[in-house]
Structure formats: structure tokens, C-alpha cells
Image (cartoon, rainbow, N blue to C red):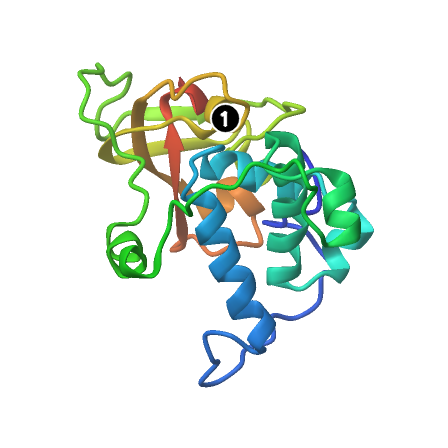
Amino acid sequence: MNGVHDMGGMHDMGPIQYEKNEPVFHELWESRAFAIALAVGAWGKWPIDASRHQKELIPPAEYLRMSYYEKWIAELVELLVKSGLVTAAELESGVPAASSPKAVPQLTADKVSPLIAHGGPASRDVPVVPRFQMGQRVRARNKHPVGHTRLPRYVRAKLGTIDRDHGVFVFPDTNAHFLGEKPQHVYSVRFAARELWGEQASTHDAIYIDLWDDHLDPA
């Protein structure tokens, strides 16, 4: 979907503030937010793509104001209610309802390190025929869905070249909305800087963007 979260190519967003020797977490609450997200995610109630889309639904002014982990908490709260893990009343009061079912946590302390080491791979070992070959010219589709997409705005309708085929992966545009994984090939697509930014860009520069089969058409 189009929104302030898709900031590539946008103007007047201010300089990127580089922090030398930046810590993993700036405040204790950030580490707790990360831990809560892992613990809840272990229940498997929604895929990571749904988490990303929920962040995209944060109102623009709030999104720009929030820090990174504030966005995590905001989307987590919404998904907790949508999935039925908690109720709005429980969140408001901070107290579990008397009738709430008790369950053993899916993620216990002994499982944390293996989970982080393994991650959540989105690759799939399924036979899918690639639509494109290395060196083929392609055009990114010019689509503006109201739902989640991993096709950046600044690359839509632009010409590029398939540089490599990463293999088969879950398609986030459908997975975010529980419409199926729709596994397909993901390619590193090379876009010349001038194709994206015009004549003021260097003729020597290019950007490589990972895009799925359904994001591309033959040129």
C-alpha cells in the first residue's frame, strides 16, 4: 500500500542520523518489546508479513512520531486483539479477565536461543517454474494496492534487468492478508540510477532490488 512507511525516493524527510557504536537497545523497554514480540509470535497466529502490514496501518502522523519499537508495540497490540489472544478490555485494564484460558507459553527460556538462531525462513522447497531468466529485461508493475506489497513506489513502471534468481520464497503481498503463501521466485533486479532518478543521477550507479514474479512483467 502507499503510505509514509514507503520512504524510498521521498524528499524533505531530513538527514539520516548516524549513531556511532549504536547499542542494540537504547532503553530497557525496547528489549522488553522485542522479547514480547518473540514470545507472542511463537504462537504462530499471524505471519511476519501481517506484522509489517499492521505497522503500515498506523496513522501517518503517529508513524512519523514513533520510534522503531513503539511501532512494534502498536502493531502487536492490534494483532493481539484481532487474533483473540487478548481483549480490548484486558489491554485497557492490564488485568486478564477471570474467564481467560490459561496456557503454557509456546516460547520458554530454553527455546529462545535456538529460535533466534533458526529465525523464520521464508524460502520454500517447492517446484515453481521461474517466469524470468538472468539477463532478461523486465518492467516493474505499476500497481497501487490498498494492502501490503513489497514493490516500492519509486521502482514501479521502471525498466530493470534480472541479475540473479534467489530461489522460491513466500509471496508477502498475499501472505500478509492470510490469502496463502503463493510461493514464487524472487530475483535481484538491477535498475540503473538514471532510470529511477533521471538525468541528474550518475551513469555509473545502479540499485538492486529483490522482487517477486508477481511484481514484474517482461519488458
Q: Helix or strand or loop: what does disc 1 sit on?
A: helix
Q: Nearer the viewer, residue 191 or 170?
A: 170
Residue 1 visible in rendering? no
Residue drawn 27% across and 60% down? 110
Query: Residue at label 1?
Result: 173
In the image, taking residue 95 as reference, residue 83 lies left or right, namely left
The amino acid at mark 1 is Asp
**Occupied quadrant, residue 190:** top left
- Image point (79%, 44%), residue name: 59
Image quarter (top left, top right, bottom left or bottom right) of the N terminus: top right
Residue closer to the observer: 177 or 214: 177
Looking at this rendering, what residue extends furthest in the front direction?
98
**In this image, 36 relative to 73: left or right?**
left
Q: Residue furthest bottom?
A: 21
Residue at point 49%, 36% (across, down):
49
Picture coordinates of residue 140, whole percent (x, y): 47, 27
Image quarter of the C terminus? top left
Vertical placement of residue 32 versus 27, above or below: above
* Residue closest to the eye, 52 or 217: 52
x and y percentages locating residue 200 in the rendered image = 58, 54
Quarter occupied by residue 171: top left
Front-most of 35 and 179? 35
Percent coordinates x, y for residue 193 in the rendering: 47, 48
Relative to 133, is 8 above or below? below
Q: What residue lies at 65% left-to-right and 71% top-to-bottom? A: 15
Q: Is residue 148 visible?
A: yes
